[in-house]
Amino acid sequence: MNRSASVAEVLGAGVEIQAEEAVAIAQQLIVALRDLTPPHTATPPYGPPTAETVHLAADGAVLCRACEATPAVSEIALLLETMLPLSTRTPG
C-alpha cells in the first residue's frame, strides 16, 4: 500500500519544507501532470494544485488528485509560496 500525505498535512505536522524541496515538489508535479495518461480522472474539488490537493507519496511521487492539466506558472508560484517558510519568502 502506497501511503501519501497532502502538503497541508505535512506542513500542519510542523515539518518545514526547505526551498530546494519545494522546488523539487513543484517540478515533479509539473512532470506528473504533463505526462498523465488515460484513464486518469481527477476528483473533486477540481482546480489548480494547492497544499490540500497535492499529495506526497512515501515512494517520492507527487500527485494532484484535483488536476488534469499542466498548471499555469502562476498556479505553481502560489503553491511554492504556500510551501515556503515565511522567513525564506522574498518579494517578486
Image (cartoon, rainbow, N blue to C red):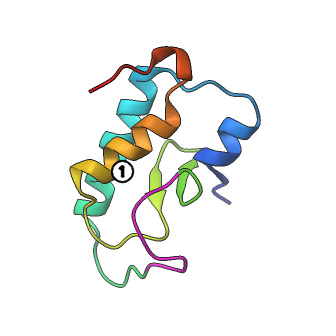
The verdict on residue 48 being magenta is yes
Q: Relative to residue 80, is residue 90 depicted above or below? A: above
Identify the residue at horizontal 73%, vertical 39% (top origin): 12
Identify the residue at horizontal 28%, vertical 59% (top origin): 71
State the residue lying farthest toward the front. Answer: 91
- Dominant secondary structure (helix, strand or loop) of the stretch shown in magenta: loop
Q: Relative to residue 69, is residue 83 depicted above or below? A: above
Give the residue type that dot 1 points to: Leu
Instruction: Give the residue pinned by disc 1.
Output: 29
Of 55 and 81, nearer the camera is: 81
Identify the residue at horizontal 43%, vertical 21% (top origin): 89
Residue 60 screen position, x and y as percent: 50, 41
Q: Relative to residue 25, is residue 30 depicted above or below? A: below
Identify the residue at horizontal 59%, vertical 56% (top origin): 52
Residue 74 screen position, x and y as percent: 27, 49
The magenta stretch is: 42-50
The quadrant of the rendering that contains the N terminus is bottom right
Q: Residues within 10 Å of mark 1 (few under 14, many from 20)?
A: many
State the residue lying farthest toward the right. Answer: 13
Residue 86 screen position, x and y as percent: 54, 22
Q: State the image quarter where residue 39 is shown.
A: bottom left
The reply, left or right, for residue 54 in relation to residue 1 is left
